[in-house]
Amino acid sequence: MRLIKQLPDPFLVADGSRVASPAEWCRHRGHLTSMMLGTQYGTMPGPPDRVSVDAEPESSVGAGHTEQVVRFDFTPRGDRPDVTFGMAATVRRPSREAAAERRRRTGCDDAGVPTLIYVGGGDFPTLLDAGYMIVSYENNQIEPMDMGNPVVGIAREAYEMIDPGAYSWGSISTWAWGALRLVDYALTLDDVDADRLLISGHSRNGKTALLAGALDERVALVNPAGSGCAGAGSYLALGDGCEDLAALTDRERWWAWTHGDFEQWAGKEADLPFDQHFLMGLVAPRPVLRTEGTGDDWANPEGTCAAFLATQPVYDFLGVPDANGIHVREGGHYQGDEDIDALREFADWHLYGVAPSRDFHAIPYPDALFEDSFVWSRP
């Protein structure tokens, strides 16, 4: 692993002092949020003024589970009813038997169902079998992904029509905006447990899930999977063959995913006022779990481990050391059954108090690899 410089101190305040109390951290959190959005991801609007929902009938997907397509029509501003755009999502509900087994497993008799907000396809039968609901959406529908040829999607186009230049959002922020609309919707469903919402996604969608979960405290647990550069991976601690900031923001690749000016930091990572453990610190004290593969070199698993370790002092400071988690398996760039099972076990632990069978602080790399990554500690 190559270390460009030691990861910066998230407790450092602009006047040179350090955060000294949880109350000060809450105030500091607002500064960090503004910095991450203003520099890296771009700002985004809040919820639209009007949302209409059309839900199709449920259909069976086997084992008693059901699936339902839901279509949204968004009107960003009430005084401009002519500007609208749509988005579809899929709601997958566990069978009654799976929900009953979850209640038995967790010892919780609450009627509400824990629900995963998923950026991407979200077809995870094993999670349904575990009694979890899944609300997912294909984010390309509001912002297409086209390498080297970015297209402004329907969401940004609509908001630009009614409020030109008001927001600096790139694609990741746009996708995160869509994910937060699923949070809005999930909280209107009678069968959803409002206190047990999770969010996840893989690769670019893992970047999206991490940003959305960091921004919205209604999300109880955040799981970026294989998210790498601009996700859970460090910009300063780089494993062999990983994507770096120059590769991400190359004009022939994905420069439009981030703030329009973020490419200026390529090659100048040492001057960045933050690294990605700042973003993961924004999730705290809520649980965050990174799921990674040792063979997923492009997503920088070593750098993700370094950022995980650098996030730990924030969780220690807030008195929830176990809520900062990581699971690193063998294998490459995918989110498979092992990742979903780790997410389910981490969620059962932090949302229901069920003791896990694995160590969510275990890292499959020698400690010496990270000993110089950062030297500061919690206040």
Image (cartoon, rainbow, N blue to C red):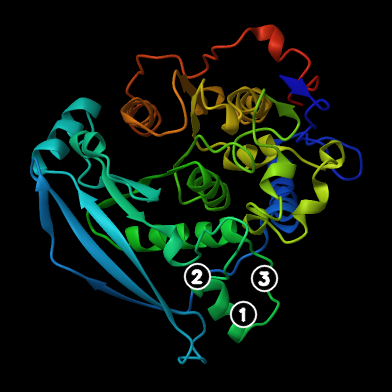
Quarter of image, res 187: bottom left
Residue drawn at x 26%, y 36% is 127
Contact flag, marks 2 and 1 (Cβ < 8 Å)? no
Residue count near mark 1 (Cα–Cα under 10 Å), binned few <14, some 14–19, many ≥20: few
Task: Give how far apart the Cα atoms at labels 1 and 3 are.
Answer: 8 Å
Query: Mark 2 = which residue?
Result: 47
Which one is in front, 257 or 368? 257
* Element marked by disc 3: loop
Relative to 119, is 42 above or below?
below
161 in relation to 210, above or below: below
Identify the amino acid type marked 3: Tyr
The C terminus lies in quadrant:
top right
Residue 71: which quarter of the image?
Answer: bottom left
Residue 354 falls left or right of residue 223: left
Identify the image quadrant of the N terminus: top right
Q: Earlier in the sequence, mark 1 or mark 3?
A: 1
Q: Secondary structure at mark 2?
A: loop
Q: Which mark is residue 160?
A: 1
**Observer able to see residue 377:** no
Q: Nearer the viewer, mark 2 or mark 1?
A: 1
Instruction: Please tell me whether residue 126 is drawn above or below residue 201 in the rendered image.
Output: above
Point out residue 64 in the picture as x, y percentages from the top left corner: 8, 44
Which amino acid does the dot numbered 1 rest on? Glu
Residue at 37% across, 26% down: 342
Res 250 seen here: yes
Sequence-first disc among 2 and 3: 2
Q: Which mark is residue 167?
A: 3
> Residue 82 versus residue 152: which sits nearer the camera?
152
| Res. 290 mark | none
Q: Earlier in the sequence, mark 2 or mark 1?
A: 2
For numbered disc 1, what is the local secondary structure? helix
- Which one is in front in this view, the residue at disc 2 or the one at disc 3? 3
